[in-house]
Each structure stands twice: as structure tokens, then as C-alpha cells.
Image (spheres, rainbow, N blue to C red):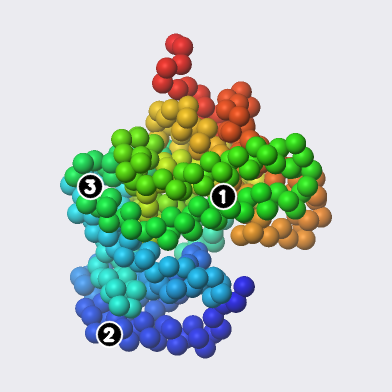
Amino acid sequence: MSRLNQDEKNALTAWVLDALSRTRYACSTLTPLSGGSANFVFRGELRTPIDPETKTVIVKHSTDFLLVNRDFNIDLSRCSAEATILRALNGADYQLPFIAPRLLHYDAETNTQVHEDFHDAVLLDPTVLHSSGVVLSWGSDSFAKQIGSRLGSALRAFHDWAAQPEQSPLRSEIWRNEPMRKLKHDTTYVNFIRMLENFPSLLDGCRKSLEQVQAMAADEFAKSPADMEGDPDWGLIHGDFWLGNALVNPDHSEHLVLIDWELAQFGHRAYDLGQMVSDLVEKQMLDGLSAEMAWTLEGFARGYGSISEDLAFRTAIHAGARYLYWYVRRPPGPELRADPDRLLRMMRFGRDMILKGWERDRGWFLQTDLAPLFGSFPGDPI
């Protein structure tokens, strides 16, 4: 993967500074922020503070290639999609249990956005070392369940808000973000069997079923909003819902901030639910956070509330397919490769989430940390 060299990064930063200099959000400095892979994100020091409390902003500059890989092309439609949905969320009359960044400025010609800066907040991702030195209390089951519950209730509220009749114009705008929808589909479903091909024994006797899952996902991708009109499991989704796109203020953890809306798209609600589940499972498997993420998943399921049996199994399938992609995003290092049994177990669990979801094997899930998704469904005997 080819990244910009330091001289190229410096030139890009200077170019963004110059573009902002002709706006009310002119900055004296831009400090790069870590954590993302698609865009160049900075904390900007305003030359003239907007008010005594607003001396910095977040500057998000997008290019037609990934921040982490200049050889990977990515469509710039994501910029207008994010600006569109942020404007809608900023103006929402509906009381939402989360905060979306205020869109302060959007320049479509330079693909540059300026967002409000939640400078006292930290990413919820427990694997990120925060520059502030703040450590969230993930070791506490009450904290983890509380955060999970807030994430779940926030996602449910967003899905419900986005489905309201008055959001029809917003949905029509976001449906145009088709390139990001294709990106989401391709990175989740096109390659997961390829990941498993590195472990041939995991494909013995089940390749056909996994190929059927791929075909099902391709059929879903071919659907249009008109095809799924009235289906409660389809609609406007966040598209990139994981711990790394949520912020909290350590002193006020009830203030949940959801960021990075550029993958907002028409899709199945299982895509949002499943991505969060896959992220929690990944952190269990790769980062040694087994109990913490299990507690978070329990809270997440409780916060999102009742779902149908169909949605639960579809969520599990999506979670498994997303989870297997860690093999590309975080290639196994020497320590993991030195423990092939553990590596095989990790990949098998991702495969089994897909297969057991496809087979609708509720009993299997009830023996795993995904059990909270399968505890009870509408229509179950009392």
C-alpha cells in the first residue's frame, strides 16, 4: 500500500490551509488526527475564534484515494452525502439520544468540510491510545453495558427517525450515495471466502453454503429502495457503525457523539447492527477484551430493543462476513502466526457466525456471546 510521503502531506496541509483562509474558518495550524483510513482529518486552530468556547474545529478533507492507500480509488460522492445527512441531523426536531457534529462549512469544489470539535471527548474504541491520556473504564461491567446500551438506543432512534415520512427527501438524496453502497458490499461479501481460502480446512463441506450467502448478498445489493418500500428492516443506515465512530466525554458519558456519516446509504439494518457486533467480536478475539466486549454487546442488544428472528440471523451473517475482513485490515503478526491453533479458532468463529446464521441455528448462538441478540423474539411462546 502506497501512502503520501511527508513532503506530499505537508503540501496537502498547506493547500487546505489556503482554501480555508478565504472563509470564516481560516486556521493558523492544522494538526493531523489519527484513527481514520479514508480522509485527511485535522484539528484546526482558528485564527479568529467563533466564540470564547470555540477555538478549534475539525477539518475533513477528502480525496479520490484512501489516506492509507493512494492506489485505492474511492468516490467523492461520500462528501456530499455526509454534508447532506449532517444538515438534516443538525436541524432535526426529533429528540435523538445522540449528538451529530454541526456542519459549519462545506466546500464541494475542494471536498472539504468543517465540523464542530468535541475537544473534550474521546473515541470509544478501547484499542486507540488517546493523546489526552484518558482511559475509559472498560473493565467495569456497568460502564461497558451502559455504553453498549447507549449505542444501541442511539442506533434504533436513528433508524426510526430516518424512516419517518418527513425524511423522504433526505432518503432520496442519500440513495445517490451508490458508490459507497457498492464499496460496503464489496468489502464485506465479495472477499470473505477468499479470506477463508487461507485455511482450506474451514471450507471443507461448507463452501456451497458460503457461496449461497454471497449470492444472497448480491441479490440484496441489486434491490432498489422501491423494491423494499415498506420493509421495516430496510432503509437509511449509518453505514460505518463501530466503536471508532463514536465519542464520549469521560466526565459526561451520557453525551454520545456519532461521527463519520459519509457511508450513509440505502441498506439493511443488519448492516449497522452487524458491523457493531463484528467490531466487538474482533476486539474480543484480537485485543484480549473478551469480558468487556461481551458486556458491551449485552448492553447494545438491550439498547436497540426487540428485533425479529430474521433480523437477528441476518445480523449474525453480516457480523461474520465483516469480522473475517480483519485478516486484510490487520494482517496477523509474528505472535499470532506463531499460534496457528488460535488463528484457526479466530477464523472458524467468523465462518460459523455466517453458517449458523444461514442455517438459522438459534441454539448455537445462545451458547455464544451473541446470545443477547437471540434471547427472545416477537411471537415466542411466553
Q: Quadrant of residue 28?
A: bottom left
Vertical side of 303 occupied by 280: above or below? below
Q: Of label 3 and label 1, which has the lower sequence position?
A: 3
Tell me the crowding category of disc 3: few under 14, some 14 to 19, or many 20 or more residues within 10 angstroms, Cα based: some
Whether residue 45 is visible? no
Residue type indicated by callout 1: Tyr
Residue 119 locus on image (x, y percent): 36, 64
Q: Quadrant of residue 83?
A: bottom left
Viewer-nearest of discs 2 and 1: 1
Residue that carries the numbered disc 2 in the rendered image: 21
Residue type indicated by callout 2: Ser
Which of the image's four quarters has the N terminus? Answer: bottom right
Residue 360 locus on image (x, y percent): 57, 28
Marks 2,1: beta carbons within 8 A: no
Extreme top residue here? 382
Viewer-nearest of discs 2 and 3: 3
Residue that carries the numbered disc 1 in the rendered image: 189
Q: Depth check: give the residue in front, 309 or 54.
A: 309
Residue that carries the numbered disc 3 in the rendered image: 167
Tell me the crowding category of disc 2: few under 14, some 14 to 19, or many 20 or more residues within 10 angstroms, Cα based: some
Q: CA distance from mark 2 to mark 3?
A: 35 Å
Q: Residue at left 39%, top 69%? A: 76
Whether residue 113 is visible? yes
Report helix, strand or loop for mark 1. helix
Q: Residue at left 60%, top 26%? A: 361
Viewer-nearest of discs 3 and 1: 1
Report helix, strand or loop for mark 3. helix
